Each structure stands twice: as structure tokens, then as C-alpha cells.
Amino acid sequence: MDEMLNPPKKTLHDIDVAGKKVLVRVDFNVPIDIERNVADDTRIRGALPTIQYLLDHKARPILMSHLGRPKGQVVESLRMGPVGKRLAELLNYPVVCLKECIGTRVSEAIDANPDAVILLENLRFYPGETENLPDFSKQLAGLADVYVNDAFGTSHRAHASTVGVTRYLPSVMGLLMEKELETLGNLMEDPDRPFVVVLGGNKISDKLGVIDSFLEIADSILTGGGMCFTVIKSMGFDIGQSVIEVDQVPQISSAMKKARKKGVKVMVPIDFVVADRFDKNASSKIVPTEAIPPGWMGLDIGPATVEKYCLALNGAKTIFWNGPMGVFEWPSFANGTKSIAECIAGASATTVVGGGDSDAALRQYGLEDKMDFVSTGGGAAMRLLEGKKLPAVEALADR
């Protein structure tokens, strides 16, 4: 981790928290169902080690998070209550949910509940959060003695709760943040080889920086999802009505040249499940990549591609996966993503998954626990892997 963070940053282990009020930025931006229950508690579970550490060391955790995109307004359906209820169940400890983030009533409630974890209201009910306003940052910081950032998923955002508060409090990273940076750092510094990267998802423009980074260190890159059609088009093949970012073809052509120069094997699907329209009930068939019919679109990788990719994955020592292989939300086009997820889960490699839709797919197939590490931050993870700085990490105290 230290190589990626220059200079290295302080962690929870570097400070004494006993008897202190500790303001903790967590990422509790979780889905809430129509019955107002947490539909997926993965991110809440991710923060438990840090919260438990603080309780074990006689500190008083004051947690803050955003939920959804209320855009500076109070939205009743985005209150933190259901999150606090689930946290109390997982922690087996009292959690008091407040209806505000700042002000006298918040300070009074914190003082009145010394034997409970405090959860502040949705940060994004306040315009000062995303605008990183000094006054809002200062009021948040005024609630505590120390600040801990454990929200890796928001670390690419320079908000009041991630960057602003660090100007007013001693600031360190939590255990989840530390684990994220260490795991992703090791991936880019010294992976066991062969190192195989699997990239899918819809937009290749979101992945150009990451592809560039992986061309420096990976042995093979396996492509799928909507993004692979831009690669296939750059190779001169027709792709029918498949999704493409035409303006990215020149960049991909130059990336492919770099791959050849570096000796990195970039693989594209050799067959697809194609559909006559973008619809879960569309007519579909399996065709070779060079024979996608005009008017049809690829919505999943085909069985021959799965076989070829699994062969590469079975020989890997390190695997990184980000992005589904097709429209996995629709059963007719889910086989590629499911099969690749199963191959990765069954491989004897160190397996790291880069959050987002890949994480959702793993949950859908019950494979999350079969991976060595699943990142809690899609955008933040990709930015870090591109070699870019994360503002929230940069703002923490140097060791």
C-alpha cells in the first residue's frame, strides 16, 4: 500500500481513540426495498470491523453516510432509519439514528447516548456536502475529536464528509479503506503470474485508463460485455447493431498496438448470443463473431468464448474482474456472466473483483464468498487502478 500512497497515510492503528468521539465516514449507500428494509447489506458489513474496533477500544463512533441522490433536499424515502436498524442487528449493539447531521440537537443527542453508536441523517440532504462547503465541514467536525474515513467507495469524491472535515480534525483511514488500498495496490505492484484481467460492462470509454494501466502489468486481458464491440470494430469486423462508441475506436486501435508491443494478449469473444432487438424476450441465436447478422446485436458472450476464457482463467495465478459479460439481468443473456463468475470462483488464483455490476452478479449467483476480495468501490477502484489520486485518501494525515 505504501508504494501507492506517497507519502503513506495514517491508519486507525496509528492513533489512540480511547474515550474519544470519533466521526466515521462510512459508505452505507445501500438499496432499500419497498418495505423500507435494506435489500443488500454488503457495504454495512464491510464497515463492521472498523466500528467494532472503535467500540473495543472505548471510543464513541459517530457514523455518517449518504444514501441515494436527494440533491440537497430532504427526501423521506432516503432517510437513514432502515440502515441504522440493520446495522444494530449486525453489530448487536444499540444504534441511535438522528434526523439531522449538524446543530445543537445533534450534539445533545450524542451526549445523551454515550452507550450507543450514533448514525447521522443522510449527508446529501444538505447542499454543503457535495459542494464541500467549509461551514458544513466545520460543523460536522465539531461533533468529534478524531475523523476516520472508511468509505472507500466515495474516496474519489472531494465532499465535505470526505475532504472538508480533514481540515479541522486529526484524520486517518479505517480498516476497510486500508484493506482496499492494500489489495488493489498489491495487484498493480507485484501480482503472482500469470495475471489475467477480465473486463466487461457497457462503456469502453470508462475503462481506457484502466486498460492502459493493465497493459503495463497484466499477461492477458479478456474482454466481454458491450465494451468489447468497440475492440472488435477496431479489428475491422462488422458488429451489426451491437453497442459501440465510435469515437473510441482510434484510442482502442492504439491500445491494441501497445498490447502487441508489450506482449499482452488481448482476447475478444469468438462467438456471441445475438438478439434481433434489445428486449429480454427477443429472438436469439448463437453466431461466430465474424458472422453477426446486420440488424442483430450481441447481448452475451457465446459458449465457445466461455470455454476459451475459462481455459485462460484456470491457468492464472492472479485474476481481476470488472464488468459483466452480457445483459446478465435477463436470463436469456446471463449465461456468459454466470459461467465466467463460476470459472473465477473455481480458479486456484488470487481473485479480486472490482465492485459495481460484477458484485451484483456475484450476489445473484451466490458466489461472493468464493472470491478472495470484492471491492466496495467501483468508481474509486477503477480510478486507483488507473494510477490516479483519490482526493479523500490524499486529505488524510501522513504517517
Image: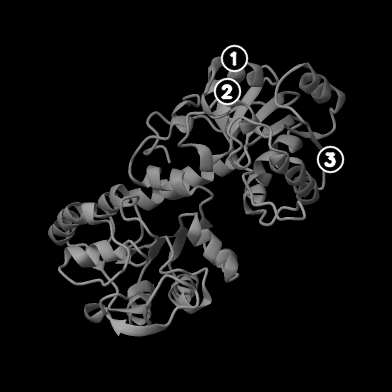
**Lower position in the chain sequence, tag 2 or tag 1:** 2
Across the whole image, how many numbered discs are drawn on residues?
Answer: 3
**x and y percent of residue 162 in the render?**
54, 29
Q: Is residue 192 above or below residue 7?
A: below
Give the structural element (helix, strand or loop) at label 1: helix
Q: Is residue 67 above or below residue 247?
A: above
Q: Nearer the viewer, mark 3 or mark 1?
A: 1
Q: Which residue is mark 1?
A: 135
Label 1 crowd bin: few (<14), some (14–19), many (20+), radius 10 Å: few
Tag 2 near tag 1, CB within 8 Å: yes
Q: Is residue 160 above or below residue 346?
A: above
**Lower position in the chain sequence, tag 3 or tag 2:** 3
| Left or right, 246 with reference to 59 | left
| Left or right, 167 with reference to 75 | left
Label 2 crowd bin: few (<14), some (14–19), many (20+), radius 10 Å: some
Instruction: Name the residue rendered at 36%, 82% in the picture.
Output: 307
What is the number of the mark on residue 128?
2
